[in-house]
Image (cartoon, grey):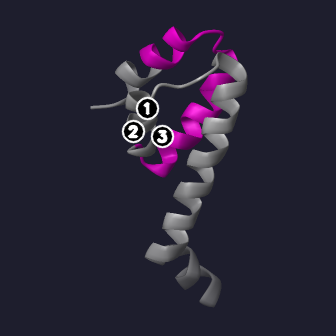
């Protein structure tokens, strides 16, 4: 029971979000090079589930345009 409460806490969710963002940004830099700040802001605003999806999708990216296209298709 205690584990479920911890996972639902705002602080825990914030830590997961920041960890996912940090990992996705490191992977993107290795995959497509420098990510412009405007795109970093868009990525940071993604919910955790979308960050996880981006983490998987970026394996198919070969250039920055792939990231831009993914963001257009997956954000409001």
Q: In the image, is residue 5 above or below residue 61?
A: below
Which numbered disc, 1 or 2, marks the residue closer to the eye?
A: 1
Left or right, residue 10 beside residue 51: left
Q: Position of residue 64 (x, y in %)?
A: 54, 13
| Residue 54 within the segment the image draws in magenta | yes
Q: Is residue 13 above or below residue 39?
A: below
**Which segment is the magenta one?**
46-69
What number of labels is visible? 3
Q: Which mark is residue 50?
A: 3
Identify residue for label 1. Answer: 37
Place of residue 71 in the rendered image (x, y in percent of width and height, measured from the top left)? 41, 24
Alpha carbon of mark 2 to alpha carbon of mark 3: how far? 14 Å
Residue at x-position 42% and y-position 48%? 47
Which residue is at 57% across, 81% downward? 6
- In the rendered image, the quadrant that contains the N terminus is bottom right
Tell me the CA gap for discs 1 and 2: 6 Å
Residue at image coords 64%, 83%: 3
Of 69 and 35, which appears nearest the observer? 35
Q: Which mark is residue 19?
A: none
Image x and y of residue 26, in percent: 68, 37
Element class at badge 3? helix
Secondary structure state at the residue bearing disc 2: helix
Mark closer to the observer (1, 3): 1
Disc 1 element: helix
Give the labeled residue for mark 2. 41
For label 1, count other residues whose C-alpha is less than 10 Å away and answer few (under 14), some (14-19) or many (20+). Answer: few
């Amino acid at each position: 029971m205690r584990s479920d409460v911890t996972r639902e806490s705002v602080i825990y969710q914030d830590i997961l979000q920041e960890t996912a963002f940090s990992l996705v940004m490191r992977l993107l830099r290795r995959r497509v090079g420098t990510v412009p700040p405007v795109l970093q802001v868009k990525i940071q605003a993604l919910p955790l589930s979308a960050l996880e999806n981006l983490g998987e999708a970026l394996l198919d990216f070969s250039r920055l345009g792939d990231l831009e296209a993914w963001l257009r298709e997956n954000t409001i």
